[in-house]
Amino acid sequence: MALSGENLIFTDITSSGLIRRFVNKSNLQYYLRSVWEGADSVWKEPPLEEHISNVMLRGHAVREDEFGRWNLNDIWVLAKAANSRLPKEWTKKPPSKRLAAELQKKVTNRRLKENTSNIPVLYAKRGRGNEGTYAHPVLAAAYAGYLSPKLEIETREVWLRFRAGDATLADEILQKASPEANEWAAKRAIGRAVRNLYTGELDKRGVRKHEHFAACTNETYKGLFDKTASQLKTERNVVGSLRDSMSLKEIAFLAASEALSIERMEDENSLGFGECRTATAKASSSLRRAIETDRKTRQSRIG
């Protein structure tokens, strides 16, 4: 866990084995809650912020919460099942309760060994446009099987591909997603790819401390935007990831600057925090000058 101003940042592993980052302080009390209220009840929690679904079944998006749990109501809709087979009815059945209880024990024991906070494998949500029953993918597959054996097989296949990081699954989802969703995914992918290369280069050159990584990163922000990451978050009223709030153009500039920083560190054989920080500052300043020069030479069409 890291503390940044008023924001708490977690890097954790979800019950479905997916790496996630939690930054919303308003959800902290629910994230840290470690006592499951029993398999005979479904935990009620406030609505979480909507985000882009990572799951697609039979051409339909299945909403997923920040802990990797799937919306069973979406599965019910795509299965075109009767009202008597709604998730709220399925969760009342003894076999469903026993399965949820056993899965909760497994998840709880594993997270205790990992010294990470426990989360429920099943809960009901109430809220505009995002309500329903959310469940661990194992339970989602079981519910799909309750609706249709074929749907259970399809659900398990999608989950296995998802856990394996199958890039083609993401591409299939984005082909059917909105332009806004594609832009969001592009920003994440571009920023993550170059960011990982940049931090890997810093590590290879002897930059080890967290505060040194942050200082090098701030050289990029200062060179391009005249402000540190913290100052930009305050100015833009950002809670969570600063880069997620940026435009695609800004992400492209950041990625280009970090790529140039890597080249400069390689060419100059920069070693240690001081030299890597200087190389980063020079690269971002050079890119800033190039951007400003290009903007100054542009001419507006008359008429």
Image (cartoon, rainbow, N blue to C red):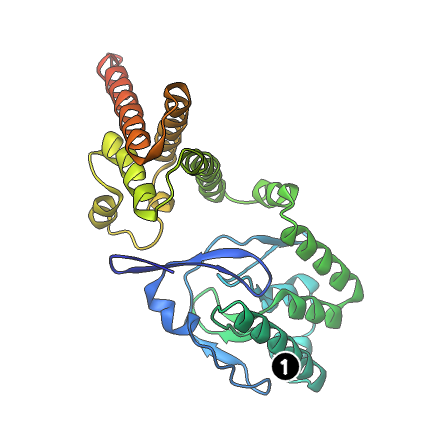
Seen in the picture, residue 300 relative to 128 is either above or below; the reply is above
Where's residue 80, x and y in %? 69, 65
Seen in the picture, residue 130 relative to 263 is either above or below; the reply is below
| Residue holding disc 1 | 101
- In depth, the one of 45 and 279 nearer the eye is 279
Instruction: Provide the secondary structure element on which disc 1 rests.
Output: helix
Q: Is residue 32 toward the left or the right of residue 36 in the image?
A: left
- In depth, the one of 280 and 28 nearer the eye is 280
- In depth, the one of 96 and 103 nearer the eye is 103
Residue for point 67% across, 57% down: 159
Residue for point 71% across, 70% down: 142
User: Which image quarter: residue 84?
Assistant: bottom right
Residue for point 36% across, 30% down: 271
Where's residue 218, x and y in %? 27, 39
Residue 133 is at least partly visible in this image: no
User: Which image quarter: residue 83?
Assistant: bottom right
Q: How many marks?
A: 1
